[in-house]
């Protein structure tokens, strides 16, 4: 037998103790009022009506499903996105509660087999934007409470895609090395080392560059890193030798965002990772925890500012590609002082 409730303002009030027991005590819908009744918000009421578990009355007339949806759309911002995510989670067995006016759309604090730790979910439309600053802030808040943060993306057909959002503490097994001093010729997109001995040592030890004849071609970020280590001296095609500062200026002209990329590159190297270009995977870097002859790259790393925003369609494509090639998708958010790594992993609840 369906429960019954009365539409009062933006809530549906359930009076019968038997109905309250089924909805609140068993299924964790709504909240108890001071008078002992059960108050359901419109999101819950629409869901329960859609599931044919609740009949709602207003002024002694039964409210239709259309009536409730219309009322909810007037009072709940982005109702369709919030409702479709809520319905999907509830159908999967997650007893989540809606948090109006909060970047955390839903929370589930009671442990369940599906979610033994506190779960927080933010719901987005596919037309919304990913905000890295908000993502970092939410991740820090959830991590302090030892919970989990999911993003629920609702597309225009109503399908929901979930991403697990976590801080990534990246570490590898490759220690830093010292190398023979050498020189390299700076071209438009790369730097060439012609010394076979230096080239072999750089390639074999830390997988720098790629063979070029008997020498080596380096990416611009690899070249600038080795310049900063005192290993490499850059020359130009007209035989001018550049100082470290001149090298930085020359490479910045070729790649304006090199400073941010270099900071992330060097931080990853400091963490013991081997770092190579990720261009063919649509990323800035791919990173290995061990030597490439023993394993594939584990991470695809996208270098962004700490104010970065992006339409979700772009991020969805990037995460899907990373999963397709068995790699983890990582945002490296670089501010002036810090670099923070955020992992977006697609999941099936």
Image (cartoon, rainbow, N blue to C red):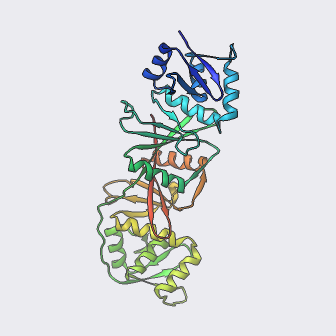
At a point 30% along the width and 64% down the height, the residue shown is 174
The percent position of residue 190, horizontal first and vertical second, equals 51, 73
> In the image, what residue occupies the spot 54% across and 32% down?
86
Q: Is residue 345 left or right of residue 204?
A: right
- Residue occupying the far front of the picture: 35
Front-lying residue, 79 or 214: 79
**Taking 94 as reference, is 295 above or below it?**
below
Please tell me which residue is depicted at 41% across the width and 64% down the height of the picture. Answer: 275
Q: Quadrant of the C terminus?
A: top left
**For the point 53% across and 57% down, which residue is it?**
133
Q: Position of residue 263 (x, y in %)?
A: 45, 70
Does residue 78 lie above or below 33 as drawn? below
Q: Is residue 201 left or right of residue 184?
A: left
Residue 121 x, y percent position in the rendering: 49, 40
Q: Is residue 62 left or right of residue 142?
A: right
Please say whether residue 112 is visible from this viewpoint: yes
């Amino acid at each position: 037998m369906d429960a019954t409730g009365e539409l009062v303002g933006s809530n549906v009030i359930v009076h019968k103790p038997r109905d309250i027991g089924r909805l609140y005590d068993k299924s964790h819908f709504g909240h108890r009022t001071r008078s002992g009744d059960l108050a359901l918000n419109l999101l819950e009421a629409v869901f329960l009506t859609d599931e044919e578990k609740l009949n709602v009355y207003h002024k002694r007339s039964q409210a239709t499903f259309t009536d409730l949806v219309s009322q909810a759309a007037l009072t709940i911002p982005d109702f369709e996105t919030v409702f479709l995510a809520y319905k999907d989670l509830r159908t999967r067995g997650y007893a989540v509660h809606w948090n109006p006016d909060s970047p955390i759309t839903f929370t589930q604090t009671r442990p369940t087999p599906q979610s033994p730790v506190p779960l927080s979910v933010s719901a987005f439309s596919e037309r919304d934007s990913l905000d890295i600053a908000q993502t970092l802030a939410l991740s820090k808040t959830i991590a302090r409470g030892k919970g989990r943060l999911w993003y629920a993306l609702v597309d225009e057909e109503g399908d929901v895609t979930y991403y697990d959002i976590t801080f990534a503490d990246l570490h590898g097994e490759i220690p830093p090395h010292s190398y023979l001093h050498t020189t390299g010729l700076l071209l438009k997109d790369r730097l060439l080392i012609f010394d076979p001995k230096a080239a072999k040592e750089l390639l074999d030890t830390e997988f720098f560059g790629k063979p070029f004849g008997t020498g080596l071609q380096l990416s611009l970020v690899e070249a600038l890193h080795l310049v900063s280590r005192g290993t490499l001296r850059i020359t130009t095609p007209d035989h001018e030798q550049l100082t470290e500062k001149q090298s930085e200026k020359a490479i910045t002209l070729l790649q304006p965002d090199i400073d941010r990329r270099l900071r992330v590159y060097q931080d990853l190297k400091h963490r013991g990772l081997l770092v190579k270009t990720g261009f063919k995977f649509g990323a800035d870097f791919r990173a290995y925890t061990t030597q490439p002859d023993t394993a594939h790259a584990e991470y695809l790393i996208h270098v962004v500012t700490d104010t970065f925003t992006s339409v979700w369609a772009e991020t969805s494509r990037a995460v899907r590609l990373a999963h397709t090639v068995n790699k983890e998708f990582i945002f490296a958010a670089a501010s002036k002082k810090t670099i923070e790594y955020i992992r977006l992993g697609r999941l099936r609840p």
